[in-house]
Every structure is written in C-alpha cells, then in structure tokens.
Image: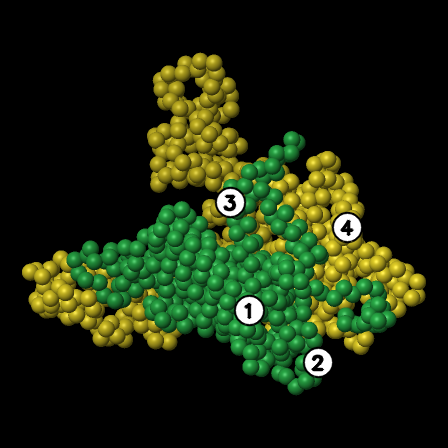
Amino acid sequence: MSRSFLAKNPSVLTFLLVLAIFTLTVTILSDAYGLAFVSTSFIKTLGKTLCLCLVALAMDLIWGYAGILSLGHMAFFALGGYGLGMWLMYARTEEIVVAALAQDVIPATAEEIRQGIATQIFGVVGASEFPAIWVFAHSFWLQIALVVLVPGGLAAVFGWLAFRSRVTGVYLSILTQAMTLALALYLFQNDSGLRGNNGLSGLQNLPGLDGVSQDRLSVWFLWGSALALGLGYVLLAWVVSGKFGSVIRAIRDDEQRVRFLGYSVEGYKLFVFTLTAVIAAIAGALYYPQAGIINPAELAPIASIYLAVWVAIGGRGRLYGAVIGAAFVSIVSSWFTGGRVPDVPLGFYTISWVDWWSVVLGLCFVLVTLFAPKGIGGLFDLVAGVRTPDRKGAALGPDDGALMEREAQE
Amino acid sequence: MRALILALLLAFSAMPVLAQTAAEIVAANAAQIEKPSRQTIGPVIEQLAASGDPQAATILEAWGDKRLGLRKADGVFFLIEKTGDGWALTALDGTAAGTAAKADVTELKPNAGVRGLIATALVQFTLSDPDRAKREAALGSIAKDPKAEALAPLAASIGAEDDPVLKAQKERLLGLLAIRFGADTATRVAAIEGFGRDLGLDLRAALNPLVATTRIAFANDLPEGANLARELRAGRELTEEEAYDLLVAGGLAPARLTVADARKALVANLKDGAVGGVALAALDSQAERDRAYNALEAAGTVPPAATDAEVTEAVARHRFAETYAEPDPAVTAAAEAALAKIGTKVGAMQGADLLLDALSLASIYFLAAIGLAITFGVMRVINMAHGEFIMMGAYTGYVVQQWITNYTLSIIVALPLAFAVTFAAGVAMERLVIRHLYKRPLETLLATFGISIAMQQLAKNIFGTQARPLTAPGWLDGALVFNDVVSISYIRIAIFVMAMLFLTFFLWLMKRTRLGLEVRAVTQNPSMAASMGIDPDRINMLTFGIGSGIAGIAGVAIGLFAKVTSELGSDYIVQSFMTVVVGGVGNIWGTLAGAVLIGTLQKGIEWFNPSNTLAAQTYMILFIILFIQFRPRGIIALKGRAAGD
C-alpha cells in the first residue's frame, strides 16, 4: 500500500479547490471586503449551509459508510449550538450588565454582577438563579470543551448501551429518534435550565467585538465554516480510506461476518457514532452564532430525518455526495420557501411555492429513493462511465447477493 | 349521623312565639331601617326574620331589592312598585294602599353589605319555600358561603323537607356547618366523627381549615389560648434563617441587613470618595462593604444590624412552634384523626383513578399503534406516514360532519368511510412505493417519510393550519363519576371499548380467516407461500391496506378528543413505534402490553409531578431506551424461525 493518501482520494483535492474558490468568490462579492454584490443575510445563509454540509458529512460516515441510520445527529448538532450559545449569551449579557452597573455610585461586587446576569438571562422563565449546568458558562475554553464533551459523552453512553444489546437496523433508527424526542421535550421545559422554548437568542453578537459590523462578522464565520468543512472532509476521507474504512463498510454490508472474522463490531460502531456526534456538535457550534437563535424546536426528530434525506439525495457512501446533497437541498429549500419564486397560476388554482414546496420535496424523496438510489452523486458515475452490474432475471437463492439466472448461465 | 341531626334539630327547632308582627318591628326600628349600617342593622333583621310573621319574608325581599319606600309625609314604610309616573303602594301587612307621586316617596337603597345580611336572613324562608328549585338554590348558596347564621334555619327546615334528595343534602350540609360553627366542642367532634371516611371534597374543605397551622416564635411559655400542633426546634425542623425570620415577623428581633439595604446606607453616607474610611473604588467586594458598614455603625450614623452571632444567640433564646388557627384542641385532634382516616381512603381511590387514567391513555396508544402492529409488526415495513393515515381518518370525520350535521349519524358514517379512504391510500402507497423497497427497509423509512411531509403539507393547504373540530355525539359528553375522586369520561370509555374491539378484530382476522393464514404464510416465507398458490403481492397489498385502514378509524377516535390538525399524526408516530417495539414486534399481545406499559408509566410519572407532562414524556422515553437494553426484542419476543433476523 504505497499509494499516497491523495492518490487514493482524488476527490479531496478537487473538493478543497472548489471550496477555496467558492469562499474566495463570496468574499470578493461580499459587502465588507469587496464588490458589495451579495447581501449579508445571503452570506449568512451560505455560511450556515457550509455547516449543514459538515454535519451531512458526519451523517454520511455513520449511514453511508457504517450503515447505521441515526436519526439523532441533529440533536448533537443542536447540543453543540447550545454549548457555544451558553457562553455567547453569558459573555454578551455580562458586558451589558457590567455597563449598567457601572452607572451606580458604588462599584459592583462579583456576586452582584453574576446575579444581574442571571436575572437578565432567566427572567423570561421566571428564575433568577444560574442552574447547575451554567457553571462553566463564564469561561470560553471550558465551554468549548463542553461543546465537544457533552454530545460526545452522550453519544458514547447511548451508543454503548444500544450497540451492546445488538440493537440494529430500523430499531436503532427508532431508538435514536426516541432519544432526540426525549431531549427536545426535556429542553422545552422551562426548568431545564436552558430557557425552555425561548431558547438562547442574540447569539449573532460576539462579545468584545462590538466595533465589528455584522457584514464583516458574517464573512469571518463563512471562512471559519469553510475551514471546518475542509478539515472535516480531509479527516473523514482519511478515516474511510484506510483499513478502518474497509472494516466499517464491511460492517454495513454484513455485520455478522465481520464479527465472525474477529473484529469488535461494537467498538467500531461506537467509535464512528461518537466521532460523527462530535463533528455534528462542532458544526452546530459554528451554525448557531450565524443563525442568531437556538431553541428546542431545532432538536425535533424531523430535523434529523431531513439530514438523512439530504445525504440520500446527494448520494450515500461518497463524501462529496453528502456535501452536494446538503448544499443543494438547503439552498433550493430556502429559495422556494423564501417567497422569491413566482407563483404558478393554473387558472382555477394558483400554486404558491411557499405552500407547495414541502409537497414537491416530499415527492422528490420518494422519486430519488425509488429511481436514483445513488442520488446526485450518481451523476458523477455516469460521467466517469462507472456502471453498476446490470443484473437481470430472477434470483436463484433467497439472499440479497444470490446469483441471478443470467449470471449463472454465463 | 342520625343522632347528631336529631340533637341539632332539638336545639334549633324551638321556634320563637309570634311576639310582634313584621310591620310593628319595622315601625319600631324606622330610623335604623331608613339609614341602615352593616354594623348595627343585624339585630333588626334578625328580629324580623324570627318574628314568625309570613309577611316578614316579603318585606325583607322587597328591602333587599330596593322595593321598600318611605312616605315622606308621615314616615310610614310601604312596599312600592313603579307605575307610569309614580309609585303603587302596598302596606306592610299586605293590603293595597293606593298610589303616591314620585317625589312623595323615598326609595330605600341599602348598600351591598346590608343586602348581604338581608339575603342571609332570607335563607331560612327560601329553605322551606314550596318551590323545590328555590330550596336547592338556597342550599347551594349556603354551601358556597357557609355562615354560622345558616345553621339554625337549616336545622329548622329539615323536619319539614319532604324531598328525600334535598333532605339528604340538607343533613349533609348541616353536618358540615356543625363542624365549623357548632355550639360546643362535643357537637363539633360528634359532627366530625359522624362523617366517618366520607370522600366528599366539601368535607375535606371543611376539615382542612381546622388543621391549618401557623408558625410562631415566643420567648418562654406558649402564648395564652394557643392550640399547639407541635414544637419546632431551630436547626432540626426549621433552619436558623427561617427561625430568625419568625422572630423578626413577631417583632422579637431586629431585621437582618440585606445586601440592598447595606448598599443604600453606604451610598447615603458617601463622603469625599470614601465611606467609613474605605475608599469608594475598594467597595467592589462584600468584605470591604461590611467593613465600611461596621465603621458607620460604630460611629452611630446607621442603625445596628444583626450580625451572625447575634442571630444565633437570638434564635437560641426563643422557642418556636406550629399552632392551629382553631383554638379548640379536641376539635383539631378529631379533625386530624378524621383527615388521616380519609387520607388513606383517598390515596387508595386516587390509585384507582390513576389506574383508570393509565388504562385510557394505554387504549389511545394502542389504537394509534394497532395499524402499525400490522404494517410494521407483521410486514416489517417502516411506515413513517402511519401518523398521516391517522390524520387522514380524522379529517375524513371532519368532512363528514360538514355534510351530516347529526353527530351520532356522522360518526357512524365516518368510521367506515375513514377506513375506506385510508385503505385506498394504503393500497396505492404499497403498489407505487413500498413494493419496490421490500429489500431496503431503511429506504422505506425515507420514502414514507417523504410521503408523510407531502401529505402533511397537503392537509395544511386544503384545510388550513388552524385546528378543525370533530365533535363527539352528545351522549358521549360528561363522565362516569364514581365519587369525588374517581371518574372517567364517557369518551375515554368509548375509546377503551373501541381498542378492545380492534384487538378482537385483529385476532379474528389473523387467526380465524383465510386472509390471516395467508398473511402469516407470506410474512414467514414468501417464496414457499407463493409455491402453495398464494399471491404474495396481493396479500402484501391487502395487509398494508388493512393496517392503514385501521389507522384511519383510529384517527376518527383520536380526533374526537384531540384537535384535528395536520400535525395530529406526527404527535403519535414516535409513541406508536415505541409501543410496537417495546411490546415485541410481530405479536399483537405484545403491542397491547407495550401500550399498557407506556400508558401506565407516563401516568405514573405524571403523578409525581402533575404540572409537568413534558418531563413525564421525557422520563418515559428514557425508561424505554433503558428497557430496550434489557429486552431488545420487546416484552413478548418471537422465538424460533418466526423471529427471523
């Protein structure tokens, strides 16, 4: 195996190149650093899309490569957002409270400042004390550590429990969905310590950067998201290209055989599950400062299903497929639901895309699943001339991989 | 109870002899009646009420309704009634007395307080009014606002009461009043004990104020007349802080200095950038602020505040106790004993009520999941659009009610129609989509999810986002009430019955019909079934259609108590899947067990924290995730070849 990493993964160079060109183009067209051709809100949309591409990459690893359809990765994504959001909200409120208390005659004590922040943040849910989970919120680095550790820890514990008892296939999907639902319901409570259904808001204002306008911040976040996506792509390409990648693909195709070959299937699955959860959390931590607000509705089970759909439309089992799917669907969705697409008058009824887009999207899932299981990524195969074997005729045995009649004759 | 009522009757039924007529009493107290005050008018009203004159009620009623007037010329009272341009007068003994011009009569307008007294006095008349409805209303008003004065008239009215229902109500109310307003300890204790283990809310409402306690602090001996519930020791039953707050509230110690007060004092004494010798800039810590305040205190510029040591010392010098507001110890003891007895019974009844609630929630989950038990449990198809079939059934019911306004008839039509509509939708979906994905279960999940969001949005486009009503027939309104604790609404009983019907139908279909046999054959081994002459495609199509159809009927049932919206189905989808998975895939008894487990669990957890159903759902799901760890194949696991993999 002397071939270099890049030679084995020709897509990496192309991908990084496209990403770099994209970032550069957007920067040049931006309000802050160039021709002012693209609005700040659209740059934010693009930055958010890059984060969604990153979480789609994670989803592709766990589903496309390891064959585990997790319907809980958007929960990890949101947890990451909450993690960073707590620090953003704390630090931002601290600035405001300190400025307000400085008006007083007597300088404020540390306790008074803390109390003031707590009242500011939790007044909306009728509390004035910091819940225990905010204990690290004052420190950027500790909170960043939590962004990784909390979703990672949750994924590790959940995965360990689930894989240990050999929950697989659709059962695992339903179980992860239940976990997401439980988490969302928990966060919806006012006494969950994260402001109930109000969520955390005002995250777009970075503490200490009052002088920097939003149009410059949005470009910075675009760069950060692009960097994270690039690094994530390289990391995952490296993970799936070696022996490790072969094992997890083998697990996807026949778990039982891999176990009989002596591999610790549960260990591999747990590692992939936790790793992807951490990547999802990092993507979330980058996403929500651009969105500005996070609330428990972001954890709803449907979000995770959408994630699976992006990957399916983009093409499972190839990293660039996931990125294309996430970018394509989310941008087209925001285009159609943004009300900028002209309505279609039919005479007796006018199709308003805001209302009908979901219907079209839903039917698209069905069509893609039925007729293009490889998704958009399959188009690259067409261009490259890669064909799947054209297996016609009835199967000779009951298993999926059984010889077909015609193959047996040849 | 009987003996007690007899005793009360004897005590109060000695009616006063007719001393004066009502008119004479009014004339004797003319000045008071003209300008009544709430404090002093009481005896007059009493006298009127007790006069025994049948006119007294009429006079009181007229007075309360501002229909009593005073002729200015001679100061005589009349019952007045408005005529065209003046008043029609009736003398107080009931004879007509001509008319008077508007200006000649002063209308008496007693204020609200006096009217209240009059109404209370009138109660004794209405209690023996010949009109049953009026007697009932009078009882209701006494029960709502119990007063000591009502005791005597109520007792007096029982003997003549001929309606057995009202008599029982009166006796019960008399007992309740006697608990609170009985003349002596023995009467009250007897009244309390007379109720035994009665479950009525009204009894508990009467008993609870008797055992309500307040906390007090005192120096040496218990204050005179206090009815001690228990003594509290600082540091054990109550914290030092609470104890000191009691002392402050009782005026036995100075208030402690709050952070805000200290701040105010410091700001007020700010001089030349320093307070009490501490520089202003250094005041950003509590220790420095305390130092500054102590300096001010030493200089005498601020009042002394209790220090921690003083607080401890003051708490040690005093005793603390909980006392009853009710001064009579025998009564409180009897009330405590009665409440304890009732408490155990109420606990048992609440348990029963919880069980009923759990059962009805379980039947809702079972209804929602039974269609899934067929499509997922038997055919192993993950149908994420199952919830939308439920929604479709509910909307079918709504549409039917737009055409047929008789609710009973519309439900009878809606049930088969909902089945037909969702059956057709299910068959179409199976033929067009699911058939091509039998070997790719995870992709079935995605495709059906796509259908699910498309259908949700379609429903939104057609019916709008607001909730649509699906009204239950009138005979399903109300609840079956066993007592004040245990009750269940008829609609929930109907849903329970429906769930049982479905269970029977499912068992009959799978175990007793040709179709059921073929379904089981096809799910176990399609190719073998095919070689026996069964058409697997047709069977799959029919099975899926039936599963979807049942979901549609469940939708009508669910729509009866939940609002019909396009999100109706998605509220149930995760719970439905969990019901099937927890119960054990492929076994209807398992689904039933799963629904019972989930329903009981959710109600049980809600019982610990009734205000928070979100938390209950959260913990229920967590429990299920853990449960799957120990029984990955559900409560009732298929064994052998049928289990497949």
Q: Nearer the viewer, mark 2 or mark 1?
A: 1
Q: Secondary structure at mark 3?
A: loop
Q: Is residue B396 left or right of residue A279?
A: right
**In percent of the image, x 30 and y 64: which residue is there?**
A114
The residue identified by callout 4 is B428
Q: Secondary structure at mark 4?
A: helix
Question: How far from the left and from the top, in percent, is residue A304?
Answer: 57, 61
Return the residue nearer the eye: A210 or A65.
A65
Judging by colour alone, the chain drawn in green in this rendered image is A
Q: How many marks?
A: 4
For marks 3 and 2, the one nearer the N-term is 2
The residue identified by callout 3 is A338
Question: How far from the left and from the top, in percent, is residue A107?
Answer: 19, 62
Asked if the residues shown at circle 2 and circle 1 are in contact, with their CB atoms under 8 angstroms apart, the answer is no
Q: Quadrant of residue B441?
A: bottom right
The residue identified by callout 2 is A257
The 10 Å Cα crowd at callout 3, few under 14, some 14 to 19, many 20 or more, is few
